[in-house]
């Protein structure tokens, strides 16, 4: 998509929204089954996103994998 097309599309959408305030609120009110379906699908998308984030964590990047394996050397002053 070229930049002129993108700018024209955004301007057209902005104009439409200004001329049709409250459209989506009314649409959701008239279509509760759409809203419920969208809520369910959004929960699935959110869970997938969280699982992806968790799976990308590399354990070797963690600062302390096993604190019990670290030996401390304490000295007393005095």
Image: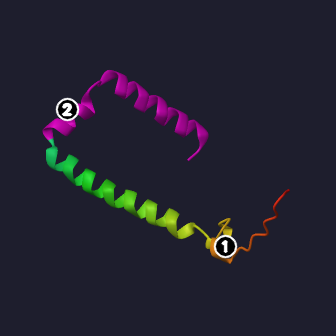
Q: Quadrant of residue 72?
A: bottom right
> Number of callouts in the render?
2
Residue lying furthest bottom: 69
Nearest the viewer among 73 and 34 is 73
Which residue is drawn at the image coordinates 53% and 39% (left, top)?
Answer: 6
Q: Earlier in the sequence, mark 1 or mark 2?
A: 2
Left or right: 23 in relation to 68: left
In magenta stretch: residue 9:
yes
Which residues lie in the magenta part? 1-30
Q: Position of residue 67 (x, y in %)?
A: 64, 71
Nearer to the camera, 11 or 23: 23
Q: Nearer the viewer, residue 78 or 66?
A: 78
Whole-percent x, y for residue 78 in the image: 85, 56
Read off the residue under disc 1: 60
Looking at the image, residue 39 lies above or below residue 12 = below
Up/down of 18 relative to 25, above or below: above
Identify the mark at residue 36; answer none if there is no mark: none
Q: Is residue 69 magenta?
A: no
Instruction: For marks 1 and 2, give the CA distance.
Output: 51 Å
Q: Residue 55 at x, y = what percent?
A: 52, 70
Report the residue at 26% width, 34% height from top.
Answer: 24
Q: Is residue 61 left or right of residue 43?
A: right
Which residue is at a point 55% across and 47% down the rendered structure image? 1
Q: Residues within 10 Å of mark 2 (few under 14, many from 20)?
A: few
Given residues 18 and 68, the one toward you in this image is 68
Q: Which residue is mark 2?
A: 26
Q: Can see residue 66?
A: no
Mark 1: few, some, or many residues within 10 Å (few <14, many ≥20)? Answer: few
**Image side of residue 34 versus residue 12, left or right:** left
Instruction: Point out the frontmost of discs 1 and 2.
Output: 1
Q: Residue at x 79, y 69 (%)?
A: 73
Indicate the quadrant where residue 65 lies.
bottom right
């Amino acid at each position: 998509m070229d930049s002129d097309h993108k700018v024209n599309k955004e301007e057209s959408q902005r104009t439409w929204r200004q001329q049709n305030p409250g459209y989506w609120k009314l649409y959701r009110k008239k279509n509760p089954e759409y809203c419920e379906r969208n809520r369910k699908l959004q929960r699935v998308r959110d869970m997938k996103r969280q699982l992806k984030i968790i799976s990308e964590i590399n354990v070797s990047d963690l600062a302390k994998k096993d604190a019990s394996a670290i030996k401390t050397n304490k000295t007393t002053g005095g």
